[in-house]
Image: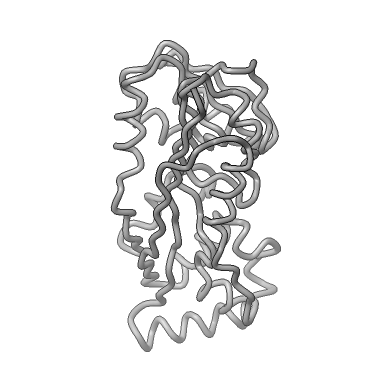
């Protein structure tokens, strides 16, 4: 089975996750409908952006650095008139002031280059992102790796970095979302898909710890953790 991209349909009936209350796709759709030029940084397979911009703006662009996802992103966005550019995380290879709106859903933690965001935004333009928050999946990570230190200030640090780059933070919201796994196969699938949880994950080295999680699921009915997310909405001056 493939673990690439933003498709989690294999987990239907085997795992569940609450959705953030703000409705990221709906927010992006509303913002994108009011502007001419939109960029999605770290778009992944492009499906989230394609869902949000069913009526494409004048200019639609996206970046990603994962070769396995670039073609998927092109299939999703080129029919909408979009352009998908290979670029490292944090690099936005576009001219100054090129976009009215920059968006990003789940960029790699610590990779958002706010100076680059400020540079490519037109005066008065904005950035809207849904980021992974501090300690996301902590209970699952600790089941594999043991106790971990958690820094709860990630959202505030990102907001501070945006302000330092000359952007104005208009909204910052955090939420913890309940995640439940009904079987050990779902746990393995997610650990393979979300590689930053346990970077060296493979079944054999973690077989004993997976067996303990499986025992917990059989005894309690599920394994529970929290997915932390934050919404950050910023505006360029002008």
Q: Find residue 170 and report its horizontal and vertical position in percent.
A: 41, 42
Where, by quadrant of the figure, is residue 98 drawn? Answer: top right
Name, please, the residue furthest toward the front: 238
130 shown above or below 153: above
Which residue is found at the position 48% from the left and 67% from the top? 187
Where is residue 31 drawn, in percent x and y? 34, 28
Q: How is the image coloured?
A: one colour
**Location of residue 223 with respect to 130 vertically, above or below:** below
Instruction: State the residue in front, 197 or 31.
Output: 31
Q: How many marks?
A: 0
Pick the residue in front: 78 or 111. 111
Look at the picture and state if 164 lies above or below 238.
below
| Along the line of sight, the residue nearer the viewer: 100 or 210 | 100
Say which residue appears at 63% left-offset and 17% top-offset.
96
Q: Position of residue 131 (x, y in %)?
A: 49, 49
Q: Residue furthest bottom?
A: 219
Compare residues 234 and 68 and report the one nearer the observer. Answer: 234
Q: Measured from the top left, where is residue 215 in percent x and y?
A: 46, 86
Q: Quadrant of residue 63?
A: top right
Residue drawn at x 60%, y 63% as measured from the top left: 197
Please report the residue visible at 38 percent of the width from the left and 67 percent of the height from the top.
179
In the rendered structure, the answer to whether residue 104 lies left or right of residue 13 reads right
């Amino acid at each position: 089975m493939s673990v690439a991209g933003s498709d989690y349909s294999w987990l239907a009936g085997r795992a569940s996750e609450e959705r953030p209350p703000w409705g990221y796709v709906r927010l992006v759709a509303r913002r994108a409908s009011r502007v001419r030029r939109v960029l999605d940084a770290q778009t992944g397979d492009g499906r989230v952006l394609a869902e949000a911009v069913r009526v494409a703006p004048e200019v639609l662009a996206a970046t990603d650095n994962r070769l396995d996802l670039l073609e998927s992103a092109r299939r999703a966005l080129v029919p909408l008139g979009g352009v998908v550019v290979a670029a490292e995380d944090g690099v936005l290879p576009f001219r100054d002031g090129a976009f009215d709106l920059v968006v990003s859903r789940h960029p790699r933690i610590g990779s958002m280059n706010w100076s680059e965001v400020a540079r490519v935004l037109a005066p008065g333009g904005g950035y809207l992102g849904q980021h992974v928050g501090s300690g996301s999946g902590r209970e699952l990570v600790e089941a594999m790796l043991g106790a971990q230190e958690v820094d709860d200030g990630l959202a505030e640090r990102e907001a501070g970095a945006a302000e330092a780059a000359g952007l104005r933070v208009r909204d910052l919201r955090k939420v913890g979302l309940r995640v439940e796994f009904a079987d050990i196969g779902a746990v393995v699938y997610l650990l393979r898909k979300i590689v930053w949880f346990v970077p060296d994950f493979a079944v054999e080295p973690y077989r004993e710890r997976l067996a303990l999680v499986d025992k917990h699921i059989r005894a309690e009915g599920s394994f529970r953790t929290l997915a932390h997310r934050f919404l950050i909405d910023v505006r360029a001056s002008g």
